[in-house]
Image (cartoon, coloured by chain):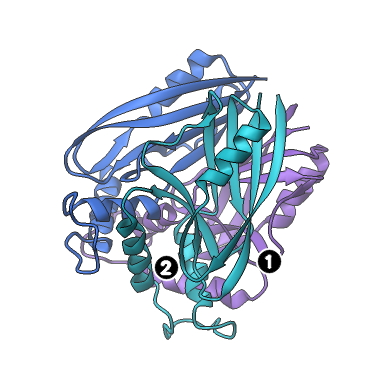
Chain colours: A blue, B purple, C cyan
Amino acid sequence: MRQHHHIFEISTCGQGLYDFTAEVAKWLTSSGVHDGLLTLFVRHTSASLIVQENADPDVQTDLSRFLARLVPENDPIYRHTQEGSDDMPAHIRAVLTQTQLSIPVQAGRMQLGVWQGIYLFEHRRAVHRREVAGHLIGE
Amino acid sequence: MRQHHHIFEISTCGQGLYDFTAEVAKWLTSSGVHDGLLTLFVRHTSASLIVQENADPDVQTDLSRFLARLVPENDPIYRHTQEGSDDMPAHIRAVLTQTQLSIPVQAGRMQLGVWQGIYLFEHRRAVHRREVAGHLIGE
Amino acid sequence: MRQHHHIFEISTCGQGLYDFTAEVAKWLTSSGVHDGLLTLFVRHTSASLIVQENADPDVQTDLSRFLARLVPENDPIYRHTQEGSDDMPAHIRAVLTQTQLSIPVQAGRMQLGVWQGIYLFEHRRAVHRREVAGHLIGE
């Protein structure tokens, strides 16, 4: 049984979903692990992780629009406003989605469904460099 | 240290919660693993996983009704509509709940609380056959 | 490769976020595990886990206020009301946040971002004693 670590660096330029499934798959292949558990953990509180459909890009647009309406900017209940009007909504959207994902690995492949992609969900408007910590245990 | 994999196949006939705690417990017992970590990963983007109360069935009904109102069908912001009026809401409800669950195992049992059950949350109306990938590492 | 288990007992006195990052870090250090995966699982259905900003306490207040408005008490759609007006909202808020978190460990430290803390999110008003099951695998 072995372990591997990796930091995925993802450059974002505004709110929305960033598919990094291919980068994760490439890391898995290079590790040589055939059978195990792969964990991804986002090291930020205003970006998150989701698994979603990778077929119709409208799904991603609709998701972003829904969350933008559910958690609006300039809501009068917010006290945390000094970091910009998109900051507190970003924290809430991150809490309502996922911080971490673990995916079983078998025969050298993640056990994703046919239409599943792995996305970083950026909730802030400015350019950011995001880090996702990857961990792999197996053999 | 050993690993086990299993695909749970869950037939669903409409929206709502499907308890498969007993199937997971049975698999754990048959694996012989006493001490470890059990991971469940749903291989779909319009169904999800949750841990919830297994005592009063009204809790499950209320959860379903709340999410149905929070994420309505036929919302004018949706562009992804060609797969049915329940499809885009299903993707959003899946994102707001969980894709994956990991549960510690000790003395051959999942460390669930007394009232906790493991549920597949079906978000679509039609009959489906859902797959949940199970992974177990331990000894 | 070794495993460790621990139950974190967290006393809560009302709704809100309870930071227990230091307790988790202390347990990790005492285990002697340098490289591995740390999992936390809340053993209740009316409390949950989140990773959020530990810098400005207003973020935590705003999160709580947002969820209180999103999932109100005394909603006429609830049938599960006999355990108190804060019980069904607590179940829903738990489902919309997280039941479990897994965090990679490297060089004896959790791979948290600079501003990330680990919180128990209490959704009920009465005093409670909550249990979080901790699992650690690594070497």
Q: Is residue C138 visible?
A: yes
Describe residue C57's horizontal placement relative to residue C47 as left or right: left
Residue A133 x %, y %? 44, 30
Describe residue A121's horizontal placement relative to residue B34 as left or right: left
| Amino acid type shown at disc 1 | Trp
Q: CA distance from mark 1 to mark 2?
A: 22 Å
Residue pointed to by mark 2: B67
Residue B70 x %, y %? 35, 68
Asked whether the beta carbons under mark 1 and mark 2 sit within 8 Å of each other, the answer is no
Describe residue A125's horizontal placement relative to residue A21 as left or right: left
Question: Can you say which quadrant of the picture contains the C terminus of chain B?
Answer: top right
Q: Residues within 10 Å of mark 1 (few under 14, many from 20)?
A: some
Instruction: Specify the quadrant of the image occupied by residue C38.
Output: top right
Mark sitting on residue B115: 1
Chain bearing mark 2: B
Q: Are dots 1 and 2 on a single chain?
A: yes
Instruction: Specify the quadrant of the image occupied by residue C72.
Output: bottom left
The numbered mark, 1 or 2, whose residue comes first in the sequence reads: 2
| Amino acid type shown at disc 2 | Leu
- Image point 80% across, 40% down: which residue? B34
Q: Residues within 10 Å of mark 2 (few under 14, many from 20)?
A: some
Q: Is residue A105 visible?
A: no
Disc 1 secondary structure class: loop
- Image point 56% across, 27% down: which residue? C108
- Image point 16% across, 62% down: which residue? A74
Disc 2 secondary structure class: helix
Q: How many numbered discs, if any?
A: 2
Chain bearing mark 1: B
Describe residue A14's horizontal placement relative to residue A120 as left or right: left
- Image point 53% across, 15% down: which residue? A31
